[in-house]
Amino acid sequence: MTAAIKRIKRFFFPESLRYQLLSRSLFIIAALLLLIGLFQYFLMHQFLFRSKAQTLQNQILAIPGEAWLFSSNMPRREGPGQGPGPGRGLFIPETQIAFIDPQFNLTEVSQPADSGSIPRLPEQTYSEALQQKKMIQQVVKDEAGQEQLVVLQSVGSRGKTVGVVQVGTPTKPLIDVLISQLLTFLLLAVLALVAGLLGFLPVLKRTLVPLSNIVSTVRQIDAGNLTERLPTKQGQTEIDRLSVSFNGMLERIESSFEAEKEAKEQMRRFIADASHELRTPLTSIHGFLEVLLRGAVHQPEQLHKALTSMYSESERINKLVQDLLLLARLDRTPTFEKTPGDLGDVVKEMETQLKLLAGERKVSFSIAEDAYCVFDPDKMKQVILNLFHNAVQHTDAAKGHIHISLDHWEGGIRLTVKDNGPGIAQEHLTYLFDRFYRIDTSRARKYGGAGLGLSITKSIVDLHEGTIEVESAEGAGCAFRVWLPELRAIE
């Protein structure tokens, strides 16, 4: 039973888009044809009955009123259908004719042999017919239960109304004509639906070809083949828009997959670099401990050297861990305590500290007035220290020159840290802000660096909605520029 219901449901509510469109189109056409058929039936009904009534009216008016009056006064000696009424030859044989005088007396003028008595209408209807010259038409049932079209028409003699002629005729011939017309229309409608079905199927199939192309293309797309794209110019606006939207989704998915692959690769490199950075100081500490265990602990000079080296290596590990923790916090997009202020005041406050870090290197400043922006003072100090420390590492201890400038630039405040060091080759500039990236590994380790300072700097600048860039060439020094939105631009 359930299977039968499902089959019936699939027949009337198909799941295929093609058959849904076909069935719904045919249903709409069939409904329209049904409405047209009903409308035609009622129009034909009114037309036929009205035409028949007018024909009977014309036949009544074709006979003089004196003849109708004379006929009503003649005694009827014949049986049904035999009366000598006027105009018997003008009416069809099935017609019933009666004359009603002003006193509402009904006289049968003509009556078919196989019909019942002439139906008598209410006196009010006869009164209305006597008072007006217009025809009155009604459909009533006689004693035999058959419908008749009854026409009432007043007649007169010498300008005076003498009575009303009632003519009735069976409606069955008219109904037969209507049914014949309706059956003909239904037959033509069925033929039209069949022809439409046969003609619409191939047209619908061709119309859905672009959709079939999309389905076949989508089936070929998987995680390893995201470069496939749907055709976007197939001559159908809706399908083309669907293809464009789907292609956009594929591009976003492809970008997400590429980003995920890149993130996994970066994580792999990060773990490898972090392991390498931790392994070096740990190996050094382990080696010194072995030396101490062999007896160096009783030799003050070697003991001091070992402890000093282990302390230095532990500081490297501590700094590396602190930097990694800071990067982890920055990756979680922390909320900085950003406040409006003059960045120039921060640079001036750090001037003594920076000169101490520079040692014998020359340090110069160029600070613009009113360098107002929104920033976290502690984090911006860290940015300046990181960039300055990087410049110190890459300039000569005696001949080095580091210049720090602060100016207004393109709707923001630009901080520049420039040195006269050996510069950086172009192939390294793209990777400078990557984690654990170092141009000179031995030199970076000498100063305790792990290649995280510039990564931290960039993360802080990004969280301030700013930008950082580097300009350098081999032998021409290096300049790091940080841009932050100016306070007036933010407001």
Image: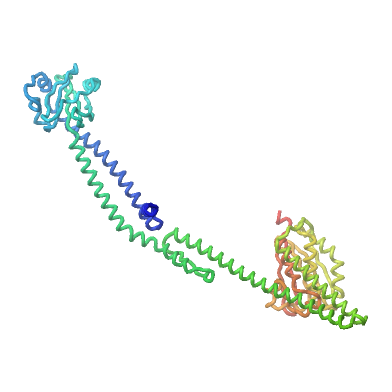
Residue name at image x 56 percent, y 67 percent: 254
Q: Which x, y percent locates residue 190?
A: 27, 51
Q: Which x, y percent locates residue 305?
A: 89, 80
Q: How many marks?
A: 0
Q: How is the image coloured?
A: rainbow
Q: Would residue 13 be visible to someone looking at this image?
A: no
As rendered, which of 395 and 296 lies closer to the eye? Answer: 296
**Quadrant assignment, res 102:** top left
- Image side of residue 181 versus residue 372, left or right: left
Q: Residue furthest front?
A: 1
- Image side of residue 212 versus residue 381, left or right: left
Q: Which x, y percent locates residue 262?
A: 63, 71
Q: Which x, y percent locates residue 39?
A: 29, 41
- Check the image and report above or below for 53 versus 160: below
As rendered, which of 403 and 27 lies closer to the eye? Answer: 27
Residue name at image x 49 percent, y 62 percent: 244
- Check the image and report above or below for 264 versus 9: below
Q: Would residue 437 be visible to someone looking at this image?
A: yes
Q: Residue furthest top?
A: 103
Residue name at image x 53 percent, y 63 percent: 249
- Image side of residue 7 versus residue 341, left or right: left
As rendered, which of 439 and 216 lies closer to the eye? Answer: 216
**Quadrant assignment, res 56:** top left
